[in-house]
Amino acid sequence: MSVVKKLISFDSVVAEELESLSKTLDITQKELIERALDFYFDHTDSITAQKISDDVVAGKEKVHNADDVFAELGLE
């Protein structure tokens, strides 16, 4: 997996907590942030899936049959 550099700023209290927790867990701050973001993204995936499901039930989103879509695209 490629690595992309990001420059971010934290509130001092958050920065101190990050430093303290990374020392306690004996992992780098980078690894702790990556783990936290992975956890958060997994959590928001479930929230997004629930919203889409609710929108389908409410008629705000339409679900298409996969066979029909493949046929329309010529992917049978």
Image (tube, helix red, strand yellow):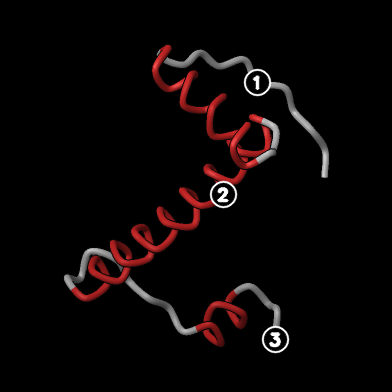
Q: Residues within 10 Å of mark 2 (few under 14, many from 20)?
A: few
Please give the name of the residue rendered at 70% of the width and 32% of the height, measured from the top-left corner: 28
Circle 1 — which element? loop
Q: Quadrant of the N terminus?
A: top right
Q: CA gap, disc 2 to disc 1?
A: 16 Å
Q: Outermost residue, right direction?
A: 2
**Disc on res. 6:** 1
Please give the name of the residue rendered at 38% of the width and 65% of the height, measured from the top-left corner: 49
The answer to whether residue 40 is left or right of residue 73 is left
Quadrant of residue 6 within the rendered picture: top right
Quadrant of residue 61 within the rendered picture: bottom left
Residue 19: % across, % down: 56, 24
| Mark nearer the viewer, 3 or 2 | 2
Amino acid type, residue under disc 3 in the picture: Glu
Amino acid type, residue under disc 1 in the picture: Lys
Q: CA gap, disc 1 to disc 3?
A: 43 Å
- Which residue is more in the foreground, 37 or 57? 37
Whichever of labels 3 and 2 marks the residue nearer the N terminus, that label is 2
Q: Outermost residue, front direction?
A: 24
The answer to whether residue 57 is left or right of residue 75 is left
Residue 51: % across, % down: 28, 62
Q: Residues within 10 Å of mark 3 (few under 14, many from 20)?
A: few
Q: Outermost residue, left direction?
A: 58
Residue 53: % across, % down: 30, 71
Amino acid type, residue under disc 2 in the picture: Asp
**Disc on res. 24:** none
Residue assigned mark 3: 76
Please give the name of the residue rendered at 63% of the width and 73% of the height, measured from the top-left corner: 73
Residue assigned mark 2: 38
Residue 7: % across, % down: 62, 15
